[in-house]
Amino acid sequence: MGLPRSRYVEEGQEGIYHCYCRCVRRAFLYGYDAVTQRDFSHRKAWIVKRMEFLSGIFAIDVCGFAVLANHLHNILRTRPDIAASWSDHEIALRWLQLYPRKPQSKKRPVPPIENQIAAILASPDRIAQLRKRLSSISWFMGCLNEFIARAANAEDKVKGRFWEGRFKCQVLLDDASVIAGMVYVDLNLIRAGLADTPENSDFTSIQERIRDWQEANILAIATHPLPVDQPKSNPHVDSWLCPITSTPHRRGILDILETQYFDLVDQSGRILRQGKRGFINPDLAPILSRIGARPEAWIDTISRFGSKFHVAAGRLINLRNFANKIGVHRLTGLSAARASFS
């Protein structure tokens, strides 16, 4: 079912979205191309670095990502409440960091930053518009994709499209769909046979989280040695990624511990690599049940999450309510929701 994004992505409202986009011509435009014998893998680092920069500008949480050879996955949470808390001056400053003024000529230099900020502050309507844009997934993805496209085309000395049209988007309606979508994204490289373990899945959010967690624990032990029989603490390292569990300073994305999420990804990845559904560890089954996912259907859910759902994913009742809200009779994924989520 083709729906305009304005029907199901509400600007100015908090929401969690699975966004994904693919390069044109299915080319390996940021991976290794066996045909041309050229390696574009360095562009993956461009994408991660750009996402990190944008997460510091936008009122948007990056909850998950995976960069593969020719496509990109993101899990994003819009935070208009954060944008609403910013002063007008901060809105103007953030926008100018995103789109700095460039000199039109040597005779017309860029005005001082204070003058640029003052020019934006002089228009309340402009401030309101920019405040809305700074919590918009369309503007976030646009700033990400345009930057990468321009850099790649400049490197290749070509013009034209880099991405296949606009990015695709799924609304994640509840905790069950959020955790399924995040695990689906984090296991992309393992599903593709490009990595054996989550910690070896390069350019993914799970690898980034595990490294941050390891650094935090190493630092904690170095500064505060614990007795041998006392378990290590699990301090949270300030990261550009949205934390799994809420901290005193930031709201988390899931109602489980960070280590529980790591275990869930690891156990799910092990089963996927075996090429069969297998069984979920009994210790993990209660976690899945608590968030509303069916343990017996979990592997099928995260293996085919992208194809099982279309514009939205979630429990059956939430999908039906969402369909009524946007004015459609039926959404793709109702049977999948019935099978995947309790």
Image (tube, rainbow, N blue to C red):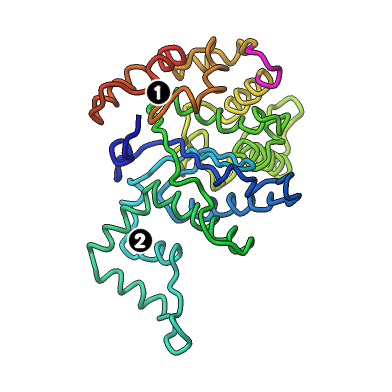
- The span shown in magenta is 272-277
Q: Is residue 127 left or right of residue 284?
A: left
Task: Return the x and y of residue 313 as percentages of the image width and height.
Answer: 41, 26
Q: Residue at x 24, y 68 (%)?
A: 123
Residue nearer the viewer, 227 or 298: 298
Q: Residue at x 47, y 41 (%)?
A: 248
Query: Which mark is first along the chain, 2 or 1?
Result: 2
Q: Residue at x 39, y 48 (%)?
A: 138
Q: Is residue 274 magenta?
A: yes
Q: Is residue 170 left or right of residue 186?
A: left
- At label 2, counting other C-alpha atoms closer than 10 Å, the crowd grade (few under 14, some 14-19, many 20 or more) is many
Q: Give the residue at mark 1.
A: 314
Q: Give the residue at mark 2.
A: 91
Q: Is residue 335 magenta?
A: no
Task: Return the x and y of residue 234 as percentages of the image width and height.
Answer: 62, 34
* 3D distance between C-alphas at marks 1 and 2: 34 Å
Give the quadrant of residue 69. top right
Mark 1 element type? loop
